[in-house]
Image (cartoon, rainbow, N blue to C red):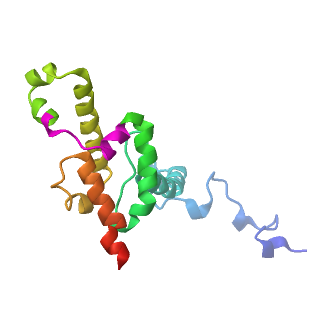
């Protein structure tokens, strides 16, 4: 029985014998003298196999976030799916941080903290509130794509920005009645 139809050469077929380590289809067209500087077949295979993995990791980090970066809201129509992932990320950073998204920030603290001299005179609870506000606002703005953030630049506190996003992402009572 001839096994060549399965792709296995018969032992007497010399044309299938290859003494090199790589198959002929993977050989580089680069002459042997310059192959030392060329990328090897194994390196090409590694790069081509890793590209989808790298892409999926980047997409995953954009969608779910990482230790340092919040999940990205790329389009407002993705708000309902994004909001739970973002909430989980914020709680993972600091459980007290979520208060900045639900309570108004006292602008008097912002004014008092405007210089380092007056910031040092603030009571500890107001310093903590100020620090949490700045961190929450930074996290929220990092989570928004440029296409979205430019629509909300006028909102200068975390709660105002969060409420505006919610209104645009979910709608308000007037849009729900339509």
Among all residues in the image, which is located at the extreme right? 1
**Residue 169 visible in the snapshot:** yes
Q: Quadrant of the rendered structure where residue 9 is?
A: bottom right
Residue 143: give x, y in percent of width and height.
33, 51
Residue 133: give x, y in percent of width and height.
26, 38
For the image shown, how many numbered marks are present on the structure? 0
**Residue 144 drawn above or below residue 100:** below
Q: Is residue 24 left or right of residue 138?
A: right
Q: Nearer the viewer, residue 112 or 74?
A: 112
**Residue 63 visible in the snapshot:** no
Q: Is residue 127 left or right of residue 117?
A: right
**Residue 134 drawn above or below residue 14:** above
Q: Is residue 104 magenta?
A: yes
Q: Nearer the viewer, residue 49 or 98?
A: 98
Q: Is residue 95 left or right of residue 3?
A: left
Q: Nearer the viewer, residue 9 or 146?
A: 146
Quadrant where the image shows the C terminus: bottom left
Magenta part mainly helix, strand or loop? helix
Quadrant where the image shows the N terminus: bottom right
Among all residues in the image, which is located at the extreme bottom? 178
| Residue at left offset 38%, top offset 34% | 96
Q: Is residue 20 left or right of residue 11?
A: left
Q: Quadrant of the rendered structure where residue 18 is?
A: bottom right
| Residue at left offset 50%, top offset 54% | 44
Q: Is residue 16 magenta?
A: no
| Residue at left offset 26%, top offset 61% | 148
| Residue at left offset 14%, top offset 24% | 119
Residue 159: give x, y in percent of width and height.
27, 48
> Range of the magenta residues?
97-108
């Amino acid at each position: 029985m001839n096994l060549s139809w399965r792709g296995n050469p018969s032992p007497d077929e010399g044309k299938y014998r290859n003494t090199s380590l790589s198959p002929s289809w993977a050989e580089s067209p680069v002459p042997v003298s310059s192959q030392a500087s060329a990328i090897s077949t194994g390196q090409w295979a590694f790069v081509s196999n890793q590209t989808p993995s790298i892409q999926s990791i980047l997409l995953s980090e954009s969608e779910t976030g990482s230790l340092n970066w919040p999940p990205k809201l790329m389009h407002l129509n993705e708000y309902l799916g994004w909001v739970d992932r973002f909430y989980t990320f914020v709680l993972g950073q600091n459980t007290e941080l979520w208060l900045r998204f639900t309570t108004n920030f006292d602008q008097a603290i912002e004014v008092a903290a405007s210089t380092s001299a007056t910031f040092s005179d603030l009571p500890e609870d107001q310093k903590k509130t100020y620090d949490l506000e700045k961190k929450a606002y930074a996290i929220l703005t990092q989570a928004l794509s440029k296409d979205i953030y430019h629509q909300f630049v006028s909102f200068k506190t975390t709660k105002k920005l969060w409420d505006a996003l919610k209104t645009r992402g979910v709608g308000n009572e007037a849009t729900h009645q339509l």
